[in-house]
Image (cartoon, grey):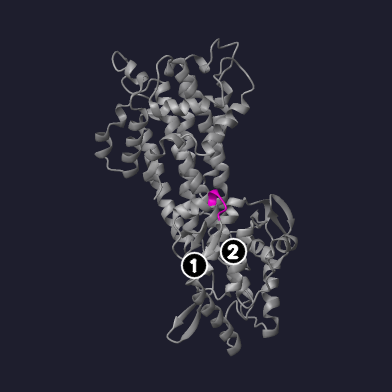
Amino acid sequence: MSKTMNALTLKPGSLTLSDLRNVWNEAAPLALAAEAYPVIAASAAAVQAIVAKGDAAYGINTGFGLLAKTRIPDDKLEQLQRNLILSHSVGTGELMSDAVCRLIMLMKIGSLARGYSGVRPLIIDTLIALYNAGIMPAIPAKGSVGASGDLAPLSHMTLAMLGVGQVRYKGELVDAMAALQAAGIAPVVLAAKEGLALINGTQVSAALALHGLFMAERLLEAGMVSGALSLDAAKGSDSPFDARVHEVRGQPGQIAAASIYRQLVAGSAIRASHLVGDERVQDPYCLRCQPQVMGACWDIINNGARTLLIEANAVTDNPLLFKDGELSVVVSGGNFHAEPVAFAADTLALAIAEIGSISERRISLLIDATLSGLPPFLVRDPGVNSGFMIAHVTAAALASENKSIAHPGSVDTIPTSANQEDHVSMATYAARRLDDMAQNTAAIIGIELLAAAQGIDFHRPLKTSDHLEHVHQQLRQKVAFFDQDRFFAPDIEAAKGMVMRGELSASCKHLFTPLHP
């Protein structure tokens, strides 16, 4: 995808992770590369030729799933496609966010535009028009098992194109037809195969997993920054970050993470103050093994990113149309099975859980005066003040919750469609639960940030490194020093917000460049 006249011009099959992050972050105008249109039109013409010839072809002039042997008369093909969308719009639960909806629409446009799905250019242009008008389909989050495509959620997406149901427009839920009329967009009448092409595919599970991926990237960065701040607050050693230690193991994420930690703490006056005469020989693992843990998280996040980038550019509906000499042939397959997405989501869940888990351990260390050397529960006059005692309990509760949520979704399956669809990926659930996990971990890191900053303040007038001093100052602009007990929840929400927005690493973003392939 490239930028042309302030619009993102999509070349099918060429999306990058940077493109996807940008769409996730903001709604920039979208256009389709002109060279894609002849390929799309040829694919649509092939479908019409099959209809005209009268040969039976799944999803074009037959029923669906176990009804594939039922032949549909030509005069009912449009009704077949509309009925498909209406009957499959059975989602439930909260609506997906605009950021996720943008990713879904972008990837569906890109997939259909590769010219293997048999839809008319009109269908793709209508999706682009909805996207550019800011008309976001109202897509319930629950109702897909991640096989045969994300049928229910993608049907809700398609409803918007028909002018049926509701959409989110200008920040409000409104009637879909009213939104289309306001934007000057005509509702579509689906031709043969078009409904099936729109709802078959992994775009919803992939969009949810990408949402989880981009949050995991921010959590990894924030967890490393807060972990470095905790190291100084606890007067820990930076010796375990020595490059030689990590080079002899050879794990790439670990080597890169250790380099970042060295740079984050470089020049700390707090570290310099205890280089001599410190009786401690080794720090607890939550300080000492940060490169090993966060580096391993880094590696599996990057592995997930590679899988999801491939999926973002993939053609995942069924059946597909291919050229065989001068003829177009319809081939049935199973690209809608989202097992790669499920595995990627499950590994992202592991990373998100572990980032929060080790952060919670550092909070526990900081409030324990016997380990940290800081005032009990990080507050003056403990006893009268409880300080960070129960903030740590919150972090512990969230870390424990993540352990349960992290159980892999991909190991589950449940037969559907009268056992025609007898093995499913559960990718949509596996990806959807990443948001809850990320929210939990962001709160844990936010609490650690508050605790570590409190510890730094107790070491004044000594300063930490330049990088970490900037983070400390940014926090203190939002949250004051905890001098005595006060309403604590707003402080945690403010710190959590810094994590979610990527603000902890903003001043040292260049250190994290290798994270973003």
Which residue is painted at 60% across and 11% down in the image? 384
How far is disc 1 from disc 2 in space, using C-alphas? 12 Å
Q: Residue at x 52, y 69 (%)?
A: 113
Task: Please state which amino acid type lies under the numbered disc 2.
Answer: Ile
**Residue type at numbered disc 1:** Ala
Q: Residue drawn at (38%, 20%), measured in percent from left and top? A: 235
> Crowdedness of circle 1 by 10 Å Cα count: few (<14), some, many (20+)?
some
Residue 45 on the magenta span:
no
Mark 2 Cα shell of 10 Å, populated few (<14), some (14-19), many (≥20)? some
Residue 15: x and y in percent read: 46, 60
Horizontal relation, residue 50 to residue 294: left or right: right
Question: To which residue does mark 2 refer?
Answer: 128
Give the magenta part as a residue range: 24-28
Give left or right: position of 6 versus 165. Answer: left
* SS for dot 1: loop
Res 409 seen here: no
Query: Could you tell whether 121 is left or right of 213 in the image?
Result: right
Tell me, for residue 33, which label it has, or none: 1
